[in-house]
Image: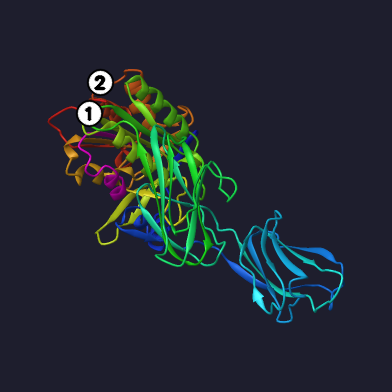
Amino acid sequence: MVLGVGKMKKKMLLSLVVVGVFLLSGFGVMAQAPGIHTISLSKPRAVESYVTESAHPYANNYDYTWTITKSGASKIRIHFTSDTEVENNYDFLYLYNGGGTQIWKKTGTIGAFWTDWVNGDTVKVRLTTDYSVTKYGFKIDQREYETASSGDVELTSGVAYSESLSATGDADYYKINVPSGSTKLEVVLDGPSSGCDFDLYVKYNQRPTTSSYDGRGYTSSADETVTINNPSTGYYYIMPQSYSGTGTYTIKATITSGGGGGSGGKYAVVVGINTYQYISGLSYCVNDANDWKGYLQGQGYTISSFLTNSQATETAIKNAIANAVSQAGSTGTVAFIFSGHGGKYSEAGLSGDGSVCYCYDGSTSSGTSGNLQDTELQSCFSGYTGKVFIFLDSCRSGGMNEVVSSDPNGANRYMATTCGPNGYGYDESSYSNGAWTYWFLEKGLVNSGSGHTDMEGNFNWAKNNYPYSGDDAPMQFDGNTGSLFYL
């Protein structure tokens, strides 16, 4: 298809690429399947030859510290040979972390052993001796190190994940995006039933450490809970750590939102993505989001979440919808606006293909697909009896019809999409908007060009003026054709 000047085909990827991504990633399993979800954190370890040693025998009245650093390591440990020995109760061997905190102190015949894991890229070994009697001292012949994982695993509110800690000092890292208006964040670590002491650390906006955190659970058991009341909006980072012992644990973070309880309010989740982590970018999706935000606020909506670019991950969008549903209550209205890439995928167990909205992390990332399937979007509103308005300015978006057609509460749903299941949407430089956003929102609603405030009448006017046809023509999915839908 040849595009005119100032027009850019937007919001799509090649179908073969999309199918490959979803078949490999197990799209949606982690966020939607019931029960506990097992994840595999990428924490590559390597052992290498590394020699550091004292004199043999060492000298009297001696005090010296050796510093061992492996650049890029997130944790490190070292191996002492079988000859390791100092005078019992008079000469001492110490191990410190990079910050100088003592890990242990040994004396006498020590022999061969691996030290415990030490967080960071540095350990320090110190030898102190008195005025008489000397022994062999020590020799280090190997070091093992672990590089940082590719990123923090993003959790979905209320969903438990399972992993394991493999050594004392071992730690894993997670994050969760807390929407505005949330009243509580509760993080629960459920560790092995016996023989372990796992601790839990939580911090806003950056990874916690054992000395820097907003909340911690550090009892003598492997089960810990951290509660943050009235949390800030944005990411909280979570670190389970083994104080002692090894074993499998589960981690679950749950966000409690404000409002709800049948309040009958109007809440909106607005998403616009120009810049993607793995795929090509777009030009005017954030403009679309800003324009919808302003219009909805004028209609009395609270913008529960406004997510653009890197904020708009799959998990963040799902959490935002859940928060808006809770805030609006059973008699309220939730609006979900999405402007960004869209595409197709092969629906397992079903004939034909499904449609998908590409989130910022639109590839295999952090254990999830980074994308929002038609069935997943429907699941986000499953059981919600209030009204739902959905506007999608993305390619292939006409295939998202399950949100209305497969929902038991579909009579309370209305959705307008850019195009059909095989069509495209377009960025338009002359509008500085997506073409469909421009005609439906800017011309139709904001400038009252359609003369309608009901969604059905406005849609029909906008579609008649929209410059694309066939599969590129907009579609609407109205769960109750006998009643008009108003925002």
* 387 or 59, nearer to the observer: 59
Q: Position of residue 269 (x, y in %)?
A: 37, 34
Q: Where is the N terminus found, in terms of image quarters?
A: top left
143 sits left or right of 221 in the view: right
Compared with residue 74, is residue 271 higher up or lower down, i.e. above or below? Answer: above
Task: Decide whether residue 185 is among the magenta residues.
Answer: no
* 144 or 395, nearer to the observer: 144
Find residue 55 and report its image quarter.
bottom right
Q: Position of residue 150 (x, y in %)?
A: 55, 57
Cβ atoms under marks 1 and 2 closer than 8 Å: yes
The span from disc 1 to disc 2 (Cα, nearest Å) is 8 Å
The amino acid type, in three-letter code, at marker 1 is Glu
203 sits left or right of 88 in the view: left
Q: Position of residue 422 (x, y in %)?
A: 32, 48
The amino acid type, in three-letter code, at marker 2 is His
Label 1 secondary element: helix
Residue 137 appears anywhere in the view:
yes
At x 86%, y 74%, the residue is 132
Which residue is labeled 1 in the image? 456
Residue 2 appears anywhere in the view:
no
Task: Decide whether residue 386 is among the magenta residues.
Answer: yes
* 252 or 411, nearer to the observer: 252
* 175 or 482, nearer to the observer: 175
Which residue is labeled 2 in the image? 452
Find residue 138 and report its image quarter.
bottom right
Residue placed farthest to the bottom in the image? 82
Q: Residues within 10 Å of mark 1 (few under 14, many from 20)?
A: many
Q: Residues within 10 Å of mark 2 (few under 14, many from 20)?
A: some
Magenta region, residue range: 374-392
250 sits left or right of 261 in the view: right
Compared with residue 361, is residue 179 higher up or lower down, i.e. above or below? Answer: above
